[in-house]
């Protein structure tokens, strides 16, 4: 089956949920009021302390009122292995994520292309649950597909080859067997190369491929909503695919300003910090 994907104008009130009809009367009242929050692409890094400070503030304020926090990849600029957890830049992030989870907020993390080596030790220390990419969830009766987004950038064949290589278990075991210093050095080199390559790649190549998106949405039986990050092009897209109307939320990065997407029984709202 070929899937046709077309950008369309939003129908009225597409993202407004009709609360009474879709929320179970048995749901605890707090779950109805508390929003689910979605963030990605913070790229936390010791060289950008103001972003880390903004994130810690977010964890101590807005996030504490949430039902759940979904971190959809690239929380860190890079992650060289869970044995780096004692790093002075990392420890306050771990502590505040753990405090949030201990305060009763469900915190979920999905790997991005920068922090795909986050594993059990990090998850145990933060009490975060790791999500597979993609993951389908149900929010107020709507099916919502979550993804980081890099797997959809299929026009960037060089990147997809790299992605395939570094997601290989043997590659990861070999990489993790090296010293922290050596790993940090290698990652710095990869980052530098990738920055140079980015300047020569067209904007289209680095965006998601519409056919790959259509295939993913069809595979998941046309969820009403897909949320992803990675492209750093925050936007609410409306599209029509095989007679299904689908909303695609693209999350923003935190380079200049923090932002999150909130969902409650009234629908979605994009918030700048
Ligand atoms: Mn990314």
Image (spheres, rainbow, N blue to C red):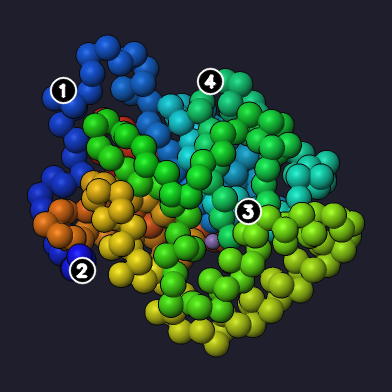
Give 186 or 61, whichever is nearer the viewer: 186
* In this picture, residue 47 sits left or right of residue 235: right
Q: Which residue is mark 1?
A: 20
CB of mark 1 within 8 Å of CB of mark 3? no
**Mark 2 to mark 4: distance in Å?**
44 Å
Q: CA distance from mark 3 to mark 2?
A: 32 Å
Under circle 4, the secondary element is loop
Q: Which residue is mark 3?
A: 116
Disc 2: CA contacts within 10 A as few (<14), some (14-19) or many (>=20): few
Mark 4 and mark 1 lie on one chain; the one further toward the N terminus is 1
- Give the Cα distance between marks 1 and 3: 40 Å
Residue assigned mark 4: 104
Q: Nearer the viewer, mark 2 or mark 1?
A: 2
Locate residue 226 relative to residue 168 in the image: left or right: left
Residue drawn at x 48%, y 50% as measured from the top left = 133
Residue 33 image offset from top left, x and y in percent: 33, 23
Foreground pick, 253 / 125: 125
The earlier-in-sequence mark between 3 and 2 is 2
């Amino acid at each position: 089956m070929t899937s046709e994907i077309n950008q369309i104008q939003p129908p009225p009130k597409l993202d407004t949920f009709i609360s009474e009809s879709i929320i179970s009367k048995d749901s605890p009242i707090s779950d109805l009021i508390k929003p689910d929050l979605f963030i990605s692409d913070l790229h936390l890094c010791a060289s950008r302390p103001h972003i880390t400070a903004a994130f810690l503030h977010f964890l101590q304020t807005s996030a504490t009122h949430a039902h759940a926090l979904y971190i959809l990849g690239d929380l860190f600029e890079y992650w060289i292995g869970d044995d780096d957890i004692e790093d002075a830049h990392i420890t306050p992030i771990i502590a505040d994520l753990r405090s949030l989870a201990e305060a009763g907020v469900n915190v979920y993390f999905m790997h991005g292309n920068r922090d795909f080596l986050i594993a059990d030790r990090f998850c145990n220390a933060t009490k975060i649950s790791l999500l597979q990419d993609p993951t389908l969830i149900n929010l107020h009766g709507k099916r919502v597909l979550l993804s980081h987004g890099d797997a959809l950038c299929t026009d960037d064949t060089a990147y997809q080859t790299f992605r395939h290589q570094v997601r290989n278990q043997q590659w990861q075991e070999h990489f993790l067997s090296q010293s922290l210093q050596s790993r940090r050095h290698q990652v710095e080199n990869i980052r530098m190369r990738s920055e140079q390559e980015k300047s020569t790649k067209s904007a289209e190549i680095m965006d998601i491929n519409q056919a790959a998106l259509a295939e993913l949405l069809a595979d998941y039986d046309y969820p009403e909503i897909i949320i992803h990050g990675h492209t750093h092009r925050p936007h609410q897209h409306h599209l029509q695919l095989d007679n299904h109307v689908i909303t695609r939320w693209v999350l923003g990065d935190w380079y200049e300003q923090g932002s999150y997407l909130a969902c409650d029984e009234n629908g979605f709202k994009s918030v700048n910090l």
